[in-house]
Amino acid sequence: MHGGIRMRDGRRLAVEEWGDPEGSPVVLLHGTPGSRRAVVPREVTDARPGLRFIAYDRPGYGGSDRHPGRRVAHAARDVAALADLLGLERFAVLGVAGGAPHALACAALLPRKVRRAAVLACPAPPDAEGLSWFDGMTSAHTQEYSRALTEPVRFADRLAARSAEIRTDPAAHLASLREGLTDADRRAVSAPPAGEMLLRGYREGLATSAYGWLDDTLALLSRWGFDPDLITRPVLLWHGGQDAFTPVGHFHWLADRIPRARPVLDPEAGHFSALEALPEVLDWLSGASPAAS
């Protein structure tokens, strides 16, 4: 299926589906910024014929209408509507980076529908008690988040300008992140399938506006609308020990609080190394392997 669905409030949600129509469903939640076509490299999904993949653009990205003021928890409503339309009684969710909290929202708020959740490079909530949220984060990311909190209008203008540049040259966005890239990150984004997918995701997700990026950032920095402590579904937490975009303290905070968390920490991995972990993560989601390592 390629197209979209109409939500009860009139919004259009751009959706894409591929893989085995009779396979075990996995709903994919893309990063920030990104799009439905940039979560898992197609060569990875093609190697798992028993899975059915469903992805959508979060509101404001790509072909999805904006939902101003949305919280992270609102993703569960959108995924529930999508599941109902497709007749999915039970499914797994996978979220990467900015999509990871939205996958946790589904696990928390849709316990009768979500079988398992996998989240990679996931930030902790901004009100995480006992966590120094910015410790270990690159100065560029710290400044960006601080600007979003203190100067939202200026931040919105800055994102609009950056989005226009990315539409013209998405590779420039990856280059601008170089300060926080480890050697492992550079290897991950240099691999043609993964690197091309990321660039396509930036370009397509920001094709019409920066609203998705803006609303994602504001949602991640606001109260999420659910408590990770109350998640009852099995959750695989994957994180790179050298991640300077989402520091490892966030991983430890979540691992200590999600009751059925299966924490996997790769001490040598960075932020984009999550792309290399996806095959094993998908195997865990499908039940094909007992653990990701």
Image (cartoon, rainbow, N blue to C red):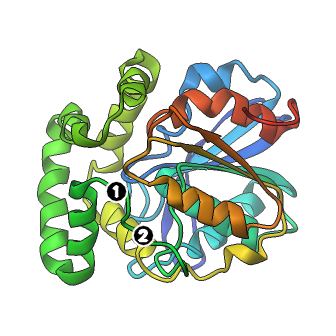
Callout 1 amino acid: Met
Q: Quadrant of the N terminus?
A: top right
Residue at x 47% of width, y 56% of height: 98
Q: Is residue 288 above or below residue 143?
A: above
**Residue 79 showing in the rendered view:** no
Residue at x 36% of width, y 48% of height: 205
The residues bearing labels 2 and 1 have C-alpha atoms spaced at a distance of: 8 Å
Secondary element at image label 2: loop
In screen coordinates, is 107 left or right of 171?
right
- Label 2 close to label 1 by CB (< 8 Å): yes
Specify the label residue 104 is tagged with. Answer: none
Residue, disc 2: 133
In screen coordinates, is 190 left or right of 164?
right
Res 198 → quadrant: top left
Q: Closer to the camera, 82 or 267?
A: 267
In screen coordinates, is 64 left or right of 21?
left
Counting labels gives 2
Q: Is residue 228 above or below residue 266?
A: below
Residue at x 50% of width, y 49% of height: 30
**Residue 174 showing in the rendered view:** yes
Residue at x 46% of width, y 76% of height: 126
- Residue 239: x and y in percent read 57, 45
Q: Closer to the camera, 221 or 94?
A: 221
- Residue 292: x and y in percent read 75, 35
Callout 2 amino acid: Trp
Residue, disc 1: 137
